[in-house]
Image: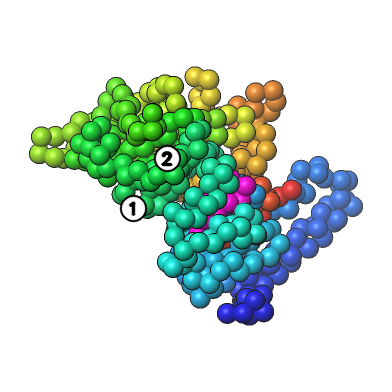
């Protein structure tokens, strides 16, 4: 597909959605003028435009991510790797897929034969092997992957890159972990076997210091670890929790941007038969210096907003529409009527939080100085949303990006009111 073809790649569906939105806004403006003539001006807040849903006209999208510069990167069948900068989509490479995304709009991508490093829309480097690319651009990669790019719930991809404070690069490729120490690649299997008796890795995340977080699943139990390079050698130490945790990829991991990971765990005990008896759930905070089990039966973390409020929900949305907000030991429970499943919680500014559920989009607000007691400000029942959401994230360009299905598997943007 040529760039000209790509520019033309829009369907009547997206145009229809935008046209309908323009008609809706025109009707709202006409109603406002009629009411204002009869009763005087309406408060400005009531005149805020409704959110607008924009649906990209792609039949099949295999990946989509929002980066810290606000851009969306997606992998689209027939077009390859594409990037949205807030105004238009740009083709970045045919047949390429995303391996990892870091800070400053950094993306590592491959087509199976070559590996590329991007910063924003610029292609920085290209090499024939991943090892060669990471070693050649080590300083840039370390800066990009020492901390998660945005505080959002982490996916558990089969590939991940993490950098520690000492510029060692930790690379998860499938269940294998390799670490670039100096100019040497070190295989972590031996160190993992010494620590937990298993040679494979199932979770990997940066915490911003000399250590990195990892976890290995073994006999249905989950063994959280802190890894570190000491004296040029790889060491793992077990994170001691008060209860055993279940090896389940559906549990959430949320970085807060300050060197901590908030982890929702299913708790219980491993059985002699090799199974695991689940008894409840717990919320755990993991940092380089300490691990704290904050509370049991609290649910799984879904977001951290600008003032530092932690948002969490019960596993599997039971009861439906219940959302909890926690900060400094104080909590608030909100009940969103007729919400259905909660697909994401997003903060666009202090005291402003959007909750996307299967049935509606909710806007919650709180006041200064603490920004921690929220109330429902607005509810919108939007059309053209996906039937199933695989990924959702807020972009600082002013929209919520969704990767979902129905119709087609594509990218949706909810443009928020200004």
Which x, y percent locates residue 299? 39, 34
Say what secondary structure mark 1 lies in: loop
Tag 2 or tag 1, which sits nearer the N-term? 1
Q: Is residue 187 within the magenta segment?
A: no
Say what secondary structure mark 2 lies in: strand
Which x, y percent locates residue 418? 74, 48
Q: Nearer the viewer, residue 91 or 17?
A: 91
Query: Label for residue 181?
Result: 2
In this picture, residue 253 sits left or right of residue 44: left
Report which residue position mark 1 lands on.
174
- Which secondary structure type mostly characterizes the magenta part of the structure? strand
Q: What range of the chain is rendered magenta?
A: 101-110
Q: Is residue 347 above or below residue 173?
A: above
Which x, y percent locates residue 141? 54, 47
Q: What residue lies at 61% left-to-right and 60% top-to-bottom?
A: 123
Q: Is residue 109 within the magenta segment?
A: yes
Number of residues whose C-alpha sits closer than 10 Å to that of mark 2, classed few (under 14), some (14–19) or many (20 or more): some
Query: Label for residue 85?
Result: none
Q: What residue lies at 87% left-to-right and 46% top-to-bottom?
A: 41
Q: Nearer the viewer, residue 1 or 231?
A: 231
Q: Are marks 1 and 2 in contact (CB under 8 Å)?
A: no
Q: Is residue 244 above or below residue 346?
A: above
């Amino acid at each position: 597909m040529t760039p000209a073809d790509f520019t033309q790649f829009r369907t009547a569906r997206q145009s229809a959605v935008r046209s309908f939105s323009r008609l809706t806004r025109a009707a709202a403006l006409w109603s406002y003028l009629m009411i204002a003539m009869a009763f005087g001006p309406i408060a400005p807040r009531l005149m805020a435009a409704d959110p607008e849903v924009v649906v990209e006209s792609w039949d099949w999208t295999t990946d989509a991510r929002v980066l810290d510069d606000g851009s969306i990167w997606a992998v689209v069948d027939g077009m390859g790797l594409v990037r949205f900068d807030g105004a238009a989509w740009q083709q970045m490479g045919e047949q390429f897929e995303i391996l990892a995304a870091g800070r400053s709009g950094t993306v590592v991508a491959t087509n199976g034969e070559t590996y590329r490093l991007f910063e924003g829309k610029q292609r920085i480097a290209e090499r024939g092997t991943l090892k060669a690319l990471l070693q050649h651009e080590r300083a840039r990669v370390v800066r990009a992957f020492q901390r998660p790019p945005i505080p959002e719930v982490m996916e558990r991809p089969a590939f991940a890159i993490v950098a520690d404070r000492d510029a060692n690069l930790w690379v998860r490729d499938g269940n294998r972990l390799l670490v670039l120490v100096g100019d040497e690649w070190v295989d972590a299997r031996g160190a993992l076997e010494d620590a937990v008796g298993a040679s494979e890795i199932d979770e990997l995340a940066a915490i911003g210091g000399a250590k990195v977080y990892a976890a290995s699943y073994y006999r249905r139990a989950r063994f959280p670890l802190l890894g570190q390079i000491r004296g040029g050698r790889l060491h793992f130490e077990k994170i001691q929790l008060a209860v055993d945790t279940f090896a389940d990829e559906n549990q959430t991991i949320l970085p807060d941007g300050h060197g901590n990971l908030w982890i929702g765990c299913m708790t219980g005990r491993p059985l002699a038969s090799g199974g695991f008896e689940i008894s409840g759930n717990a919320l755990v905070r993991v940092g380089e210096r300490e691990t704290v089990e904050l509370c049991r039966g609290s649910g799984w973390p879904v977001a951290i907003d600008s003032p530092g409020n932690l948002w969490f929900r019960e596993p599997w949305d039971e009861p439906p529409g219940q959302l909890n907000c926690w900060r400094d030991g104080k909590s608030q429970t909100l009940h969103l009527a007729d919400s259905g499943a909660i697909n994401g919680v997003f903060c666009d500014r202090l005291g402003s939080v959007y909750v996307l559920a299967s049935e509606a989009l909710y806007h919650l607000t709180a006041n200064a100085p603490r920004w921690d007691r929220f109330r429902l400000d607005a509810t919108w029942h939007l059309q053209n949303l996906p039937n199933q959401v695989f990924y959702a994230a807020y972009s600082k360009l002013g929209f919520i990006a969704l990767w979902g299905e129905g119709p087609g598997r594509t990218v949706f943007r909810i443009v928020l009111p200004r």
